[in-house]
Image (cartoon, helix red, strand yellow):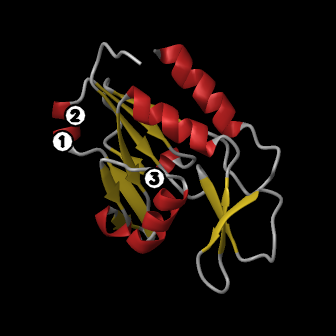
Amino acid sequence: MERNFNLLIILDLDNTLIYGSFASSEMAELLFQYNNYLKIYERPFARELVELCGQMGDVIVYTSALRDYAKGICSGLNMKPKELLSRKHCRIHKGRYHKNIREEWLKAYDRIMIIDDSPDIWENVDNEKVMMIVPDEFKGQSGDIGLKMVIERLLHLQ
């Protein structure tokens, strides 16, 4: 896939690509069991989105989850991000984790696309280079098409 611009895609994990549940089972496909209590479910079309993002540009995973947990999800989805940012890279404000666009990303890339179900936790996104794609929150439903719509939007933007 040929690109005419330098693109960075930032992917969120929880409720965007996967769903972590303490229930005994969910309707979505089980990705892996994280521990005795928590199971991780793959969102429909997650692998297709990950593959497309890798073809379109550089991919960074940015999550407010713990790094070990995030590494397991990346491995389960066969995702090899350029960088994996986790909870320790977030800023805490009023009891919530916040993510921000780094200055070096703005300098290095022509466009930055953020795919995250929680746009309100992002700071520094009021830049013409930054575009936010907000899929509906994923809660383990098997017939979910939120990422299919994200894929269609990405294909339309090329």
Label 3 crowding class (10 Å Cα cut-off): few <14, some 14-19, many 20+? some
Label at residue 121:
3
Q: Say which amino acid is labelled 1.
A: Glu
Helix, strand or loop under label 2: helix
Q: Tag 3 or tag 1, which sits nearer the N-term?
A: 1
- Residue at image point 30% right, 13% down: 4
In the picture of the structure, the residue carrying the numbered disc 1 is: 103
What label does residue 118 carry, if any?
none
Q: CA distance from mark 3 to mark 2?
A: 18 Å
Question: What residue type is disc 3 on?
Answer: Ile
Question: Is disc 1 surrounded by few (<14), some (14 to 19) or many (20+) residues within 10 Å?
Answer: few
Q: Is residue 106 left or right of residue 59?
A: left
Does the image show residue 122?
yes
**Residue in view at x 50 percent, y 31 percent:** 52
State how far apart marks 1 and 2 are (Cα).
Answer: 5 Å
The answer to whether the residue labelled 3 contacts the one labelled 2, judged by CB atoms less than 8 Å apart, is no
Is the C-beta separation of discs 1 and 3 under 8 Å? no
- The answer to whether the residues at label 1 and label 2 have Cβ atoms under 8 Å apart is yes
Amino acid type, mark 2: Leu
